Image (tube, coloured by chain):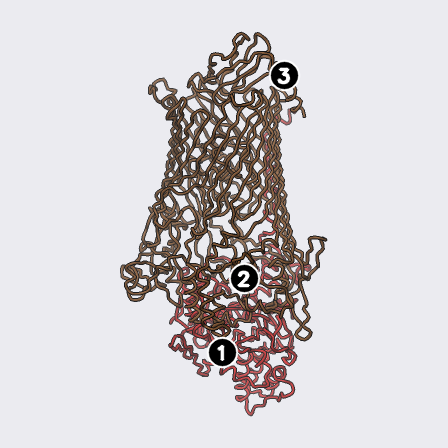
Amino acid sequence: MKFLFKHIRLFILLLLIVWMSACKKFLDESPDKKLAIPTTLNDCRAMLGYTPFMGTDASYAEVSADNYYNTQADHNALIYEGMRRAYTWQPDQIFDVPDNDWARLYRKVYVSNVVLATLQKIPVEASNEREWKTLKGESLFIRAKCFAQLVDLWSLVYDEANASTLPGIPLRLTDDFNETSVRSTMQQTYDQLLADYHASLLFLPPLPLHIVQPSKAAGYALLSRAYLAMRNYPEALKYADSSLQLKNTLLNYNTVAINQTFSFRQFNVEQLYYTTASSGHLINSRARVDSTLYNMYAADDCRKQLFFRQHADGSFLFKGSYTGGSSQFAGIATDEVYLTRAECYARQGNTAAALADLNELLRNRIKTATFIPVTAATAEDALQKIITERRKELLMRFVRWMDIKRFNKDGAGIVMKRKINNQEYILPPNDLRYALPVPDDIIRISGMQQNPR
Amino acid sequence: MKKIIAFLLLLTLFQVARAQVDIKGIILDKQTGQPVEGVLVQLKNGLISSLTNSSGSFEIRLYKPLDTLLIQHQSFLPVLFPVTAEQPGSLPPIMLQPKYNELNEVTVSTGLQLVARERATGSFDKIETARFNEQVSTNVLSRLEAISSSLAVNKKTNALSSSVSIRGLSSINGPRAPLIILDNFPYEGDINNINPNDVESITLLKDAAAASIWGTRAGNGVIVITTKKGKLNQALSISLNNNISYTASPDLFYDKKISSSDFIDVEQFLFAEGFYNSRISDPSRPVLSPVVELLEQKANGTLTPAQADAAINALRLNDTRTDFNKYMYQTAVSRQHAITLSGGTNSHSWNASGGVDDNTSNLGAGYNRVTLKTDQRIILSNKLQLSAGLFYTSTKSTAGRPGYQEINPSSGELPPYVMFASGAGEPIPVMRTYRQPYLDTAGGGRLLNWNYYPLTDYKNSSNTSRSHDILGTVGLQYKIIRGLDANIAYQYQHTAGTGRLLQNTRSFAARDIVNGFSSIDPVSGAVSYVIPKGGILNNSSSTAKTYNIRGQLNYSQRFNRHELNAIAGYDIRQVKSESEAFTVYGYNDNILTYIPVDFSRQYPHYITGNNTTINDGTGFTNKTNRFLSFYTNGAYTVNSKYTASFSVRRDASNLFGVTTNNKWTPLWSAGAAWNISRERFYKIPWLEFLKTRLTYGISGNADPSRSAYTTIQYLGSNAYTFQPIARLDQFANPSLQWEEVAMLNIGVDFKAFKNRVSGSIEHYRKKATNLIGVAEVDYTGVATYTLDKNTAQMKGSGWDIIINSQNTSGKLSWQTNLLWSINTDKITEYYLPSKDGYLFVGDGNSINASIGRPVYSLYSYRWGGLDASNGDPVGYLADTLSKNYSALTGTGTQINDLVYHGRALPKFFGSLGNTISYKGMSLTARITYKFGYYFRKPGLRYTNLFNNARAPANFAERWQEPGDERLTNVPSMTYPASNNRDNFYANSEVLVEKGDHIRLQYITLSYRLPNRLLPQNIIKGINLYINANNIGILWRANKAGIDPDYRPNTILPGRNIAVGASLNF
């Protein structure tokens, strides 16, 4: 007892320490089992698996392109003014809902950055190495795909000559949102997205558990698409080839039933990576397919029936989405990779290889009974045929905007026209409006540089 | 059982004594001369006792010729009064001396201790039983608005508990609900589970000093509910209360909505413009209104123009509200029965009560509640006391018919001409998700009927939820030495709830989902079902368990002229809630069978072809909130004149909302009071009592939803990979600071003119830093458009005045109670960079950016009239007329360019009640009022009209031809609609009205039956009452007939009248 009194302070201190640690434990309980501060691989997997965010991509690469048109009545019925302004390539205010393409892409960038930051804090061990690497690869892949779409929409076409002076996009590489957004140069943007793709390929599995998840096959395919956007055809060829080494299956359209509301199932053997995109302009009761485009399909082309349904007014609407529904497929599939490889072969002068790829695709598109392989006298002839086939195959796949930009840079001279309320709107080749306006609220809040008009 | 025996024993004794002499007496307060209610009058042997009634009189039976009355009351010194049997009839009045030679020692409860009002420094508003019971309701909170000072109920939100605020809002984005304390512990359950008949009193803690004792959760004020308890040495008392109340059907025509004929004209116009073209040709067959279908049939030749026009014109006369009135709404009826028993011996007091409520709403929804409650206090020794309480509440709610604005198609609102019953009362199919002509032929008769019949569909589903709530409290109080007590209390609450929604095989929901997931073989025509035919049953259950342990030391001592009261305590609390839900398909309620379905696969929809999985309706939640608190407070009084007080509290919780360093938040207050009327120099004869008090304290607002970390929320699993998925929930926001509110409160309590006038006048000043508001963020860097940010600093001040007066006394008594609050505030600093006008126009619910203006101000775009040539609204850009709507509603208008109307929250508000009593009759009427604020009327938005079928009736007054601009401010109809133009008009100055109004809240008439009519010795009192509530607006400043308390476009609750009787035994 005497001892106790003598050391009472010590005892009190000890008691306090014990008590404080008990308190800490008591207060460390998670307030909601469904809530977590992301710290584990499972948390990362769960964030990347949230389809409403991660499975949605930008739509303006098709909205602003020439695969479709809206009638005047349908145009006037579009709910937001910004949508109407976007249709006629107005220089500003084409995004007036907060849920716009900019937000859709940058929120995926943010999730990827949160996952990357979380992974950084998880030590790699033998037991978790595989999943850790897969997650690292997936988040780099997703970030790169977003950057690629962003630079496609908000920057002019890539040109080595002035890429280090033209504006690119803001490169958000951390999850710190207090950083001010600053536009990088176009060169920096492409350097970053290529680096991300290349890094992702070190970590991704050859093929995914499910095509809603990234894989090497899809990574190569998208890397190939990125080089195509840069008009770096040798690299595009290399990675298209790498992708097809891993997966080259095509769906034979002869086996697909006609007269269905939507011709294709949600998932098919061609898809490498699956995301969707949609917009009021593109819904399948509103987006009429350009008649020149429709007339390009031969009568024995299965796509003529599988891709289109006729409206009561005689025009044609698209029903061939690889989503199996009314939204459009914004991922990537082997048909595109075949066409990319064919195009690059043709540009190399390798006519035989180019035609082999083209015919492999067409064998699965044209009615078997009447299929005759395409021939070409020259590599240039083959290239023109491949480019035409690319247009016919990849409508509503969000690559047309990129294609127009790069073809026009090479002098294709594609002029896009819209006619609404007795007024004709023209987007001439290489116009400054090929870089869409950054959403006005972003300019206002961040003070970022707007694209010159 | 023991009680019953004691009761029977008492009755027997009465029998024995019947032959003896009755004596009557009256007990008065020596200081005021007023009768004293509730005085215990006992014969010295303690067996026979009686209580005085409200007129101070009592009756007792002598069975010895000589005896002594022992007269006791907690606020008065006890008196011994000898009586003899030779003094039949009435005794001379017995005068009681108040304890401490004071007026009634009124105490107020902070939930942690009882504070003598006399020495209180803080701001309390105590609502006594009598006033609380002037209204009849099932719910406790709904009565408070009219009768408490500074409490406001925001009727623009639905949840009652989160709509109550005390002394104005501190923040608009944080948790807004005040903390509710039920018998000393925070109440986490459903406030509707408390039976108002069990309530003894309610105390509102208004200033920082009063509230800070409850820590971080008290930033929005504290409501302390004290339930009825037994008293020591009290005879058995039984009271019964029964009432029935009727609420009229609401007036659906209060919603001033576009007329059927006008809406049909709009649809015809839009049809001609091709607005519906894409929907008509959409293969997913989205629903179209009946008029659009007729127009389409006219266009494609199915109907002749004459047939179509005749059918359309017939619809012009319809108004869907007549069907709602006829088939959906009825008078609501609520029945309430309550019984309370209480008694006490010298070592044991007890109370037991039971209540049954049985309500049927205007839409036929049912609500049943059974409450049982008991309290026990046992004095185990002169050092040790045990108290225990138990509440049990069981409720059952059943859904009723769909109400107005609840039968909506997927395309927006129901057009005003759509009826759901034929003239003969037969159900008519109503537009819902898919086009009617398509549904009529879908599947060629092989599918289930795909029509939606709102008239009868509710009969095919039953939606029932039940809850059982048990709340038990045990406490031990131990006297350590004189003046020092220790008590330890434990509370446990267990709430179990279940929900059951059965949509049977005939319900639209079941038919729709069965058809949607079915497919027809094009060759054989055979239908294959993915979802079996049958009902759909959703079951859910939830439990919530709350544990609370509190240890507290209480010190209370008088040394001559000094008095010290202090407490210190430690509190641990855990609230754990869990829930789960599941759904089965093909359910047959008769034989309890169901048919399994495959939730993992995707199936194409029969109409749209879109692939979806079947909703498994399965989910789980599990939440745990933990709190640790230390608190202490003390008050030191000298000479019963000067009091100084302080309090400190620290709270910690496991919420993510705070980093570890901030988990412990100290809040403190200090105060002083001076009882001037006790000073020797005080010589104001007519002002008997005068006290001033002053407090200053800091309160905070902890919002659990705000996080210092980025958090994610798990949401089930991915439809394709079956791996768990999670959404970002909160974004690490380390720069966010807690809101801190410092409040200074100065009060004066007084009693004057022999207590005929009493009340308090309080002035408070508030300074809030780091007010949290919503700020736009650059969504390039984060997956959200807005984040909570510290937005502004504000200063506020106000007055709360309470005056009670006894205008006349005697036979005709007239009392007045006036509550008058003034609340002003202004922004002193604004932190966010953007001052774009569009951020601040609207309904006044965003924090204002102009220094010197009220925190919530109503701003508008400046109005330049309508363009005489085409009826376009015109605004001002830099003082020149402009129709550049994107600039007007964008960066072109800064906050300084806006028109400032004034406050969006009332500056003056309160209520005035008058009670007139004559003999047993008493009439109370109370008005409430709000002055000094503005509100915005809903404006016509053509985008809404075209896309959602919603527009106000003043569509009829729109500009149509040159010259109209002199008569109207409603812009012309343009097509396509421009949302910027709509926004400009809807937020322009022409739609703002003054909100000032006076409302007659309730009238209560009660009649206390004279004693001579009562059966002697059995019934002590019968009180009959009638209460009319929610009577209506007496005066309003706006000419549009709008009740500014309610959200625009909603219907107002109907008037309510209740009749009832209470009996005391």
Q: Is residue B1058 left or right of residue A422?
A: right
Name the kind of residue labelled 2 in the image: Arg
Name the kind of residue labelled 1 in the image: Asp
Chain seen in brown? B
- Residue B1001 is situated, as x and y percent measured from the top left of the image, at 43, 39
Callout 2 touching callout 1 (CB < 8 Å): no
Q: Which residue is mark 2?
A: B432
Q: Chain of mark 3?
A: B
Question: Which residue is outermost to the front?
Answer: B424
Q: Which residue is mark 3?
A: B15
Question: Which residue is outermost to the bottom?
Answer: A377
Q: Disc 3 to disc 2, how far (Cα)?
A: 73 Å
Residue drawn 47% across the image and 58% down it: B785
Q: Earlier in the sequence, mark 3 or mark 2?
A: 3
Both labels 3 and 1 in a single chain: no
- Residue B807 is situated, as x and y percent measured from the top left of the image, at 37, 26
Q: Quadrant of residue B345?
A: top right
Q: Chain of mark 1?
A: A
Q: Chain of mark 2?
A: B
Q: Nearer the viewer, residue B456 or B551?
A: B456
Q: Nearer the viewer, residue B61 or B47?
A: B61
Q: Quadrant of residue B17?
A: top right
Question: Could you classify mark 1 by the number of other residues whose Cα lies within 10 Å: few (under 14), some (14-19), or many (20 or more)?
Answer: few
Chain seen in red? A
Q: Nearer the viewer, mark 3 or mark 1?
A: 3
Q: Which residue is mark 1?
A: A313
Residue drawn 55% across the image and 46% down it: B655
